[in-house]
C-alpha cells in the first residue's frame, strides 16, 4: 500500500531534495520548501541543481502531483510530518544553528497536535531536545512528546556515488520518547531499506558525528603518512595497497589534497565545540586531524613548487592547470574544496591558474575573485600549454591518458595517473 500523508521537507539541497523525491515516490504528498526562490523556481521548471537527482526523476515527481516545490510558508499548513534539512555551517569556528532555528520557528507556526517533526541536519548532540523542542513549543503552544512527535535521523547520502542510494542505505532513527521514535521509524521504514533505532536523539546525533569524525581522522592519518613517506622516499600508495589485502583490522583510506564538502571540514568541529563547551576539554583527535587536513592544500603547492624547481621553473610566472574544483569526484560541489585553497595560494605566489571542471557549472562560492581563476575545458592544447597539471579531483570524465601524453609535468594528488617520467604522485 502506498504511504499517505502530507510531508514537508524544509531545505531542498543535497539532502532535502533526494528525500523529498523519495517520499513522493513512495506515495506521500510532499512540499519541498526552500527559502531560496531561485532554487524553487528552478525545481518547478524541472531543472535540478543537485547532481544525484536527474531531470527525469524530478519531472516524474512533478507530474505525479505528489511533489511541489515552494517558497511560500502557507504551503506548510496542515503538515503531518516535517523534516528539517537545512545547512549547519561553522561561523568563526563555532556551530551556526541559525538555519535550524529559522526552520523550527517556521514549522512551529504550522504545527498541529499529532504531527511529527524530524531534524536531519548534522549537528552536535543535544540540538533536537535543547534547541528545536523549545522553539517548536514556544511557537505552537504544543508540548513536545505530549502533543506532537519529535525526533532526529542523520543523513548518510554520498553525493556522486550511484551505488549509495538513499533508499538502500540503513538509516539511524530516534525520538525524544518511545512514541516519537515509533513515528519516526514508521516514516523512514517507508523510505529506506532498513531503519536502525537508537535510544535517544543524542545518540543519533552523535552517531553522525562519529561516522564523519572517523573518516576525518583516518584521512588525516594517511595524509600525514604520505608527507613523511615522500620525504623518506617510500611509496605510500604501494603500502596502502599492500595493507588493504589484509582481510580484517584494516580499512582503506587514501591521501589527497585535503578535505572538502559540507561534512568532513565541519562536522568533527561541531563535536569538538560541544566537548569544549560542556566539558572544557579539547577533542585532540579532531584538532590534530583539522591541522593536518587543513595543511594539505599548502603541501600540494609546496610539492608543486619543488617539482617545478626540478624542471628549471618557478611557481612565480608558471602556468598551472588544475583538474577538478569539486571536493570529490562526480559532484559539482565545490564547498570548502581544497582546490580553491590551492588556486588561491598558487595565484598569490605569482602563478597563472586555470581550472577545468565540467561539473562545477555555477559560480564558485568561497573563492577569492581577485585571483582571477580562468575556467577552461580540458583539451590537449590546454594541457600542453601548462607548465604543470595538478590532478586535484579525478572526475571520470577527465581523459587522464591524454593529459599524460601532452603534459610537461603532472602532479597527481590522487594517484589516478599511472607512473611516468613526467608524473609525480602525492
Ligand atoms: N551534502 C551532504 O553530503 C550531506 C550529507 C549528510 C548530511 N548533510 C547535512 O545535511 C544538512 C543540509 O546539507 P545540504 O548539503 O543539503 O545543504 P544545501 O546547502 O545543499 O541545502 C540546504 C538548503 O536549505 C535551504 N534553507 C536554508 N535555510 C532555510 C530555511 N530556514 N527554510 C527553508 N530552507 C532553508 C537553502 O536555501 C538550501 O537550498 C547539513 O546539516 C549537512 O551537514 C549533508
Image (cartoon, rainbow, N blue to C red):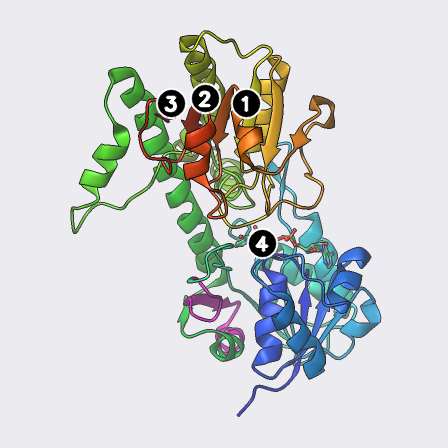
Q: Secondary structure at mark 4?
A: helix
Q: Is residue 317 above or below residue 176?
A: above
| Residue occupying the point 21% across, 33% down | 239
Q: Kindly report the distance in space between the C-alpha atoms of the residues bearing marks 4 and 1.
A: 49 Å
Q: Kindly report the distance in space between the C-alpha atoms of the residues bearing marks 2 and 3.
A: 6 Å
Q: For residue 247: magenta?
A: no
Characterize the local packing of mark 4: few (<14), some (14-19) or many (20 or more) Cα atoms within 10 angstroms.
Answer: some
Which callout, 4 or 1, points to the residue nearer the camera? 1
| Residue occupying the point 53% across, 29% down | 383
Q: Kindly report the distance in space between the C-alpha atoms of the residues bearing marks 3 and 4.
A: 51 Å
Characterize the local packing of mark 1: few (<14), some (14-19) or many (20 or more) Cα atoms within 10 angstroms.
Answer: many
Where is residue 397? Give x, y as percent. Answer: 50, 47
> Which callout, 4 or 1, points at the residue further toward the start of the chain?
4
Q: For residue 165: magenta?
A: yes
Residue bearing mark 1: 386
Question: Contact (CB < 8 A) between labels 2 and 3?
Answer: yes
Q: Is residue 128 above or below residue 215?
A: below
Q: Is residue 365 visible?
A: yes
Question: Contact (CB < 8 A) between labels 2 and 4?
Answer: no
Q: Secondary structure at mark 1?
A: loop
Query: Residues in magenta?
Result: 164-185
Q: Is residue 282 visible?
A: no
Amino acid at each position: 500500500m502506498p504511504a499517505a500523508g502530507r510531508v514537508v521537507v524544509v531545505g531542498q539541497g543535497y539532502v532535502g531534495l533526494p528525500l523529498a523525491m523519495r517520499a513522493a515516490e513512495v506515495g506521500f504528498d510532499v512540499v519541498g520548501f526552500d527559502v531560496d526562490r531561485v532554487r524553487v523556481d528552478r525545481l518547478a521548471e524541472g531543472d535540478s541543481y543537485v547532481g544525484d537527482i536527474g531531470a527525469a526523476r524530478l519531472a516524474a515527481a512533478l507530474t505525479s502531483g505528489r511533489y511541489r516545490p515552494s517558497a511560500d510558508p502557507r504551503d506548510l499548513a496542515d503538515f503531518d510530518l516535517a523534516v528539517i534539512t537545512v545547512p549547519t555551517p561553522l561561523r568563526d569556528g563555532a556551530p551556526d544553528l541559525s538555519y535550524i532555528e529559522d526552520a523550527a520557528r517556521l514549522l512551529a507556526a504550522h504545527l498541529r497536535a499529532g504531527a511529527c517533526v524530524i531534524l536531519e541536519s548534522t549537528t552536535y548532540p543535544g540540538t533536537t531536545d535543547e534547541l528545536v523542542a523549545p522553539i517548536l513549543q514556544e511557537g505552537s503552544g504544543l508540548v513536545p512528546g505530549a502533543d506532537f512527535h519529535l525526533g532526529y535521523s542523520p543523513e548518510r547520502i554520498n553525493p556522486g556515488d550511484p551505488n549509495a542510494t538513499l533508499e538502500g542505505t540503513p538509516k539511524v532513527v530516534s525520538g525524544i520518547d518511545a512514541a516519537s521514535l515509533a513515528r519516526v521509524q514508521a516514516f523512514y521504514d517507508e523510505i529506506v531499506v532498513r531503519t536502525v533505532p537508537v535510544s535517544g536523539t543524542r545518540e543519533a546525533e552523535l552517531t553522525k558525528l562519529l561516522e564523519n569524525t572517523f573518516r576525518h581522522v583516518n584521512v588525516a592519518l594517511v595524509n600525514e603518512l604520505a608527507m613523511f613517506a615522500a620525504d623518506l622516499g617510500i611509496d605510500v600508495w604501494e603500502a596502502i595497497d599492500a595493507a588493504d589485502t589484509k582481510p580484517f583490522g584494516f580499512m582503506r583510506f587514501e591521501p589527497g589534497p585535503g578535505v572538502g564538502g559540507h561534512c568532513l571540514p565541519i562536522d568533527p568541529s561541531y563535536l569538538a565545540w560541544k566537548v569544549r563547551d560542556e566539558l572544557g576539554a579539547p577533542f585532540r583527535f579532531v584538532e590534530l586531524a583539522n591541522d593536518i587536513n587543513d595543511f594539505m592544500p599548502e603541501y600540494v603547492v609546496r610539492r608543486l613548487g619543488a617539482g617545478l624547481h626540478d624542471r628549471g621553473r618557478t611557481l612565480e610566472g608558471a602556468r598551472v592547470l588544475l583538474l577538478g574544483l569539486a571536493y570529490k569526484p562526480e559532484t559539482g560541489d565545490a564547498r570548502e574544496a581544497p582546490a580553491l585553497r590551492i588556486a588561491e595560494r598558487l595565484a598569490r605566489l605569482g602563478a597563472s591558474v586555470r581550472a577545468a571542471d565540467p561539473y562545477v557549472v555555477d559560480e564558485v562560492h568561497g573563492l577569492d575573485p581577485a585571483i582571477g581563476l580562468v575556467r577552461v575545458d580540458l583539451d590537449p592544447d590546454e594541457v600542453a600549454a601548462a607548465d604543470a597539471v595538478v590532478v586535484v579531483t579525478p572526475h571520470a570524465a577527465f581523459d587522464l591518458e591524454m593529459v599524460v601524453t601532452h603534459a610537461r609535468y603532472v602532479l597527481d594528488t590522487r594517484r589516478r595517473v599511472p607512473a611516468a617520467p613526467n608524473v609525480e604522485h602525492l
